[in-house]
Image (cartoon, grey):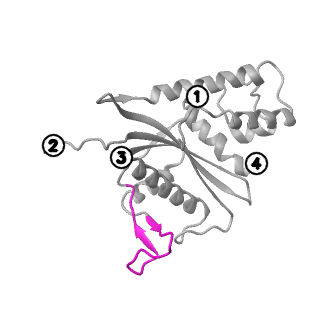
Amino acid sequence: MAMPSLPAGGMDVFYIDESTAPGSVFAFTAICVPFLRLQDFEWRMVWEEHLKGIREWRRRASKRDGLRVAKELHASKLASGRGRFRHGTTQYTRVEAAQVYRALLADIDFLPQPSVLSVVSGPGSILYGHSQLEASLIALFQRMRTSCERSERLGLVFFDEGHGEYRQMYRKARVYLPTGSRVHNWGSGTATKNLPLDNFVKDANFKDSRHCLFTQLADIIAYAPCY
């Protein structure tokens, strides 16, 4: 049996993280990073180019704001002035920390458009019988599937470590992912249709955010609506 070939668009890697404000909103963000592209009739790994871009993003923040290059970014701590993110022996004040956080968000220029997928839900959000966290993740999976379908690409997923329940939901979504129609009807009289994550590889992966700049970036962006 012949092995299936990659679709014309290649493959993307999605790095996912979440953030929440107690009693308010819950946000998931997926950073879509190009991985394989067809160039000059050969498949080339382009992921390294974007890794260089995010490393330079951290270096610019170090020069501009004194943000420690090797420090793992946690948006909730950074934006509030906690966690000793600054070079030297002093911490950012709350005002300085807020400015550094906003500067990081404003300086994201190393990924092609569109590369950021975010879903924000309120405390009473319900989607297909699922509550806030589950509803947000289902909605994010829907957007990820649509992104890969439109670009004719395969997807590979990395979650931050410590969330085994996300893998379970991912595995379920590869078989069953209810999706609504813009006109509230799929033509068969039903409001939803099963559009599984069949353009993603078999299983989700986990990555320790301490060692993954893209997962840290997802955290930085996910925290914005919770800030």
Q: CA distance from mark 4 to mark 3?
A: 33 Å
- Are there few (<14), some (14-19), or many (20+) residues within 10 Å of tag 2? few
For this orientation, the residue located farthest to the left is 1
N-term-proximal mark, 2 vs 3:
2
Q: CA distance from mark 1 to mark 4?
A: 23 Å
* Rendered image: mark on residue 201: 3
* Rendered location of residue 136, percent (x, y): 57, 59
Q: Which residue is mark 4?
A: 227
Q: Amino acid at mark 1?
A: Ile
- The magenta stretch is 178-197
67 over 136 or under it: above or below: above
Give the mark toward the camera: 2 or 4: 2
Q: Which residue is mark 2?
A: 2
Q: Which residue is mark 1?
A: 54
Give the mark toward the camera: 1 or 4: 1
Q: Is residue 196 magenta?
A: yes
N-term-proximal mark, 4 vs 3:
3
N-term-proximal mark, 1 vs 4:
1
